[in-house]
Image (spheres, coloured by chain):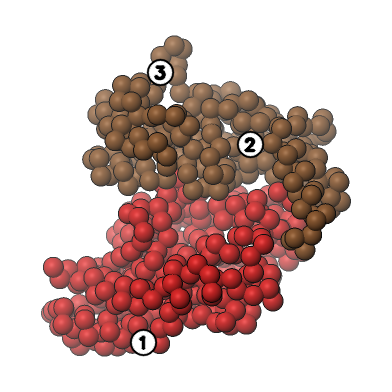
Chain colours: A brown, B red
Amino acid sequence: METDGGAAKWRRRRTLQGATGVAPLAAGGDTMAAPAATNPQEENAVMPNATVELTINGQMQRLEVDVRTSLLDLLREQLQLSGTKKGCNQGACGACTILVNGQRVDACLTLAVMHNGAQITTIEGLASGGTLHPLQAAFIEHDAFQCGYCTPGQILSGIACIAEGHAGSPEEIRAWMSGNICRCGAYPGIVAAITDAARGG
Amino acid sequence: MIPFAYEAARSERDAIAAALAGGRYIAGGTTLIDLMREEVERPERLVDINALPLRSITAGPDGLVLGALARMAEVAAHPAVLAAQPLIAEALLEGASPQLRNMASIGGNLLQRVRCPYFRTLDAACNKRLPGSGCAAINGINHGHAIFGTSEHCVATHPSDLAVALVALDAVLLVQGSGGEREFPVEALFRLPGDTPHLEHTLLPGELITAVRVPHGPHARHARYLKVRDRASYEFALVSVAAALDIRDGVIRGARLAAGGVATKPWRLRMVEAALIGRAVEDTAFRRAADLATDGAQPLSGNGFKVELLRRTVIRALEMAGEVP
């Protein structure tokens, strides 16, 4: 069944359509989702079939979502908050780290519909006015990135690491930042930036 | 992701009714959503249980009680856990990443699916994913696989660190079903693969894990978890050992040991335990007992190193628990 040509085709079509970020169709939302479509043709559609209220970077929003939408895809594809990055999309790299009710989570491994009423903080919500968050400034000061793709996740995770009280030594920071992978290997700068920001309070 | 219906349960009763009607519980979602995206898991209906009041952590005369929806990070940092069963906190902090520990629940941790790469690869043979399709791991890349409890149908290890600690501590699982409440040892939750590797646990249809109870005991004060893996953190175990010793006047009165990363379920080392009773807390006794840990091991083509690694990990974990330098 898995190698069936027809099944493979519609799976690929759905993947492509998902990647273009098709705007959701207008429809009445309800927290109880409609039964799933079983026709492969209908499966291609992104169907808003639930409503969720989220406070994102201080702004309350009422959103119509397809129940399949991850918190990550909601931010990136529906709200154009593309600062949060999609790396592995399976909880292994930490590029999608955001704060939910103040706690760091991997936004790729949770459904938006599961977070009704939550407070979400992304990289876009850190600077106030024209002033960078102290950890953002410390990342620049310490050259804590090269390509920059993992950086938003590193910064959100670093903020939580400091808030949790796990930034007492370079060794502790390395252990408690292990959920964020940097393929450029900017780890010495990342540890230095977090150390600095933790000292600065 | 294949479409599904979603509902948030408002009571245990609603949740159990929905599960009996074909719904699949979702708590942290860190295993399930990942596998749904890969289309390894294909639930038609998700029952979100996060609103149920199953998140408390308390210590009473019967033991430490961990609500099934308490998150790994909450349990690991809780003063009652650190006071009553520090082994549980240590095992939890050796697992996953800080982000995942904020998300993953205690009940979900016990029910997490295996990390065998062939399980999550749709075009590979896997009896657990597609019964009767075969096991690609037996003659494939299997350095991370099991040396105990395997069958010709499945050799995947159980990935939970927490489960290893709970099995060593004789923890009890509390579950709620349509027929009422029941409880049984956490160890009895897990099945050996045999010829039905797709059946992984002993919960009845619709049953919901509500809590884990960990009985108190003198061994709790000399209990450690040692995890050996390919990198220093955020990696699954090659071999791990939970060791808890009841030590009085320098003599071992009771011992509880379980191993992870080596078996298809959390693997209690009862022969090692028996060999330690009445012995002095010193290395010679640990080494003699550890030799028994590997009895009956059946290594595969790529994981023979686990036999010696298990023996050494048992010794080191006993040294840590007994505070023998």
Which callout, 1 or 2, points to the residue nearer the camera?
1
Query: 10 Å neighbourhood of mark 1: few (<14), some, or many (≥20)?
Result: few
Tag 3–tag 2 contact (CB < 8 Å): no
Residue nearest the observer in this picture, A25 or B127: B127
Q: Secondary structure at mark 1?
A: loop
Residue B128 in the image: state x and y as whole percent: 63, 71
The quarter of the image holding the C terminus of chain B is bottom left
User: Which residue bears the numbered disc 2?
Assistant: A73
Image side of residue A118 versus residue B271, left or right: right
* Residue annotated with mark 1: B295
Check disc 3 and report the residue beneath it: A132
Q: Amino acid at mark 1?
A: Asp
Of pointers 3 and 2, the one earlier in the residue sequence:
2
Task: Residue at 55%, 62% (x, y): give it.
Answer: B117
> For the residue carrying disc 2, how many other residues have a C-alpha within 10 Å: few (<14), some (14-19), or many (20+)?
many
Q: Is residue B181 visible?
A: no
Q: Residue at x 44, y 83 (%)?
A: B298
Question: For this view, does B178 lie left or right of residue A1?
Answer: left
